[in-house]
Image: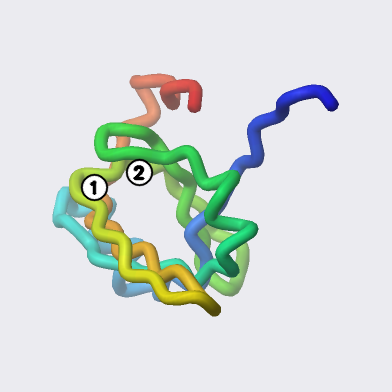
Amino acid sequence: MDSFRMRFIMGKLTDEELQALRDGKVVISKMLLLPDDYKVFHYKEGDDIEAETPEGNRIWTTIRHMEIVSDDERVIVILSLLHKPMSQPPTAI
């Protein structure tokens, strides 16, 4: 079987959080994953990840800090995100 990279997007960012990111503030967000989904979550601190509001507005961010909380049924990924200016292309994961 070929290897692949799955791209994750931080969803449900509020408009206030989106504006805070644009203002250069750090935003803390979480992602709930099933254990099998977490196996393909290859992000680490310093990587870029896209964030999105329910209306579909997106912004590139950099993961400043990441914490993982897990049990047998779910994995919670807590991320501190900082806006990545468009002049800098996203890093490959």
Disc 1 marks a residue whose amino acid type is Leu
Please name the residue shown 45% across and 69% down the image.
75
Residue 48 vertical position relative to residue 12 in the rendered view, above or below: above
Q: Where is residue 53 drawn, in percent x and y?
A: 51, 67
Residue 93 vertical position relative to residue 59 in the rendered view, above or below: above
Disc 2 marks a residue whose amino acid type is Thr
N-term mark: 1 or 2:
2
Please name the residue shown 42% across and 22% down the image.
91
Q: Where is residue 34 drawn, in percent x and y?
A: 59, 69
Q: Secondary structure at mark 1?
A: strand
**What is the number of callouts on the image?**
2
Q: Where is residue 1 drawn, in percent x and y?
A: 84, 26
The quarter of the displayed image where residue 89 is located: top left
Residue 78 vertical position relative to residue 7 in the rendered view, above or below: below
Location of mark 1 (residue): 82
Label drawn at residue 12: none
Please name the residue shown 35% across and 33% down the image.
47
Crowdedness of circle 2 by 10 Å Cα count: few (<14), some, many (20+)? Answer: many
Whether the residues at callouts 1 and 2 have beta carbons within 8 Å, the answer is: yes
Please name the residue shown 52% across and 66% down the image.
11
